[in-house]
Image (cartoon, helix red, strand yellow):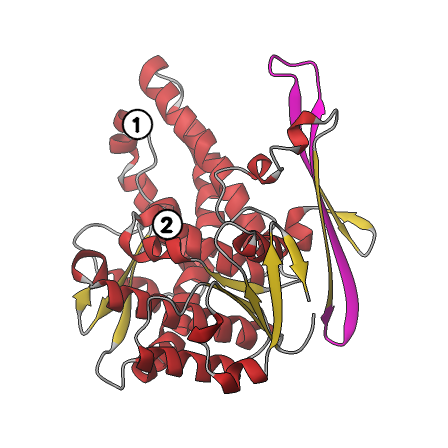
Amino acid sequence: MPRRILLLEGDNAQGKTSLLEAVYFFSTFTSIQSSNDRQVISFLALEETLPVCRMVADFSRSGNNHQIEVRLILEQNGSQNGLRFRKEILVDGIKRSAHQAVGLFNAVIFLPYMTRIIEGGPEERRRYLNLALAQVVPGYAKALSEYMQTLNQRNALLKQIAERNTDISQLNYWDDLLAEKGSFIHFSRSKAISEIELLANQIHRTLTNDQEILQFSYQPALFEENSSAKLIETFQNTAQIKDYFLETLKKKQREEILRGVTTIGPHRDELRFLVNQIDLGNYGSRGQIRTTMLALKLGELEFMKNRTDEKPVLLLDETLAELDHKRREQLLQAISEGDQTILTTTDQKLFSPDFTKHSTIWHIQQGVIRT
């Protein structure tokens, strides 16, 4: 990668966003935009006998050079649709699972549609947290995967108990496992949200000339409705959260058997963003939401750097287009003082001459990059 700042210029639909998505894929090993990873494989490759997508990244971490290779493969397996999807990850030539490889390369990405993190449903905000924390919290990705598997098993058992009058004591095993994994996720989220909020608020105040104060409202789905969400901050460790989790599961056991679903836990967490105590998801203007997303992403960048002592790559897609002149200048100033960044644009004139002077500029046309 040349220089610290790379400016990728090209018309619409030439492949700029695809490049950013490919870079980000190495940080989480899942698609940021597609509903499933098999959609990452080019539709042109589907015409081949063995459809494959192969991505390779060379990067430096702690002064050491590494290579990650990802292979997404659709192969014949004799089933009804005839194809089985398989993902292979190699780190320095050695096969690794996604849980083992995640966190080796860190990146923060901002695509225009990501304003739905604020405007969309709670699942968007949970996914945002999961992708960020999986990169820097050891064991988070594995715990989340195991939690979701346990949740599915427990829900199936709840339905079975209601329909067939199965022995209720069978819930004890799944309750304990759910509380163990869930308490780690709750604890990790609570700590991370507090850290990102502090960093993002400082950046947000700079972007708004100290006119607006950004706050996060974390609402863990662990407590009774009349309990304060701040209660989670009083817990000193995951063991205390697990005990509370188990206690609450016992209280809600009858209700959950009747409903056939687990009603508490990190799979139902909520996170709200407030500016001057106004909920942006309900009342935020387009400009406020855009500015908050920038502050959130730059705060996330600093959070990752603080947690790992490594500098994540910042990926910004058409970020300047909807900002006014003042906020555009402030953002470019923040980027100039930051770490390695890749920006895309259709109009190089949005960037100041001084900024482009200190950047490497590449051009992309029909998926081909010209340096």
Q: Provide the secondary structure element on which disc 2 rests.
A: helix
Residue 89: within the magenta?
no
Task: Name the residue beneath numbered marker 2.
Answer: 124
Split into 4 quadrants, where in the image is the C terminus? bottom right
Task: Name the residue beneath numbered marker 1.
Answer: 257
The extreme right residue here reads 93
Residue bounds of the magenta highlight: 60-87
Q: Position of residue 214 (x, y in %)?
A: 27, 74
Residue at 37% across, 72% down:
295
Question: Decide: marks 2, 1 in contact (CB < 8 A)?
Answer: no
- Out of 354 and 195, give the one closest to the viewer: 354
Q: Position of residue 114 (x, y in %)?
A: 39, 56
Q: Position of residue 284 (x, y in %)?
A: 20, 63
- Image position of 275 with respect to 135: above or below: below
Kindly report the secondary structure that dominates the magenta region of the rendered protein.
strand
Circle 2 packing at 10 Å, graded few (<14), some (14-19), many (20+), is some
Split into 4 quadrants, where in the image is the N terminus? bottom right
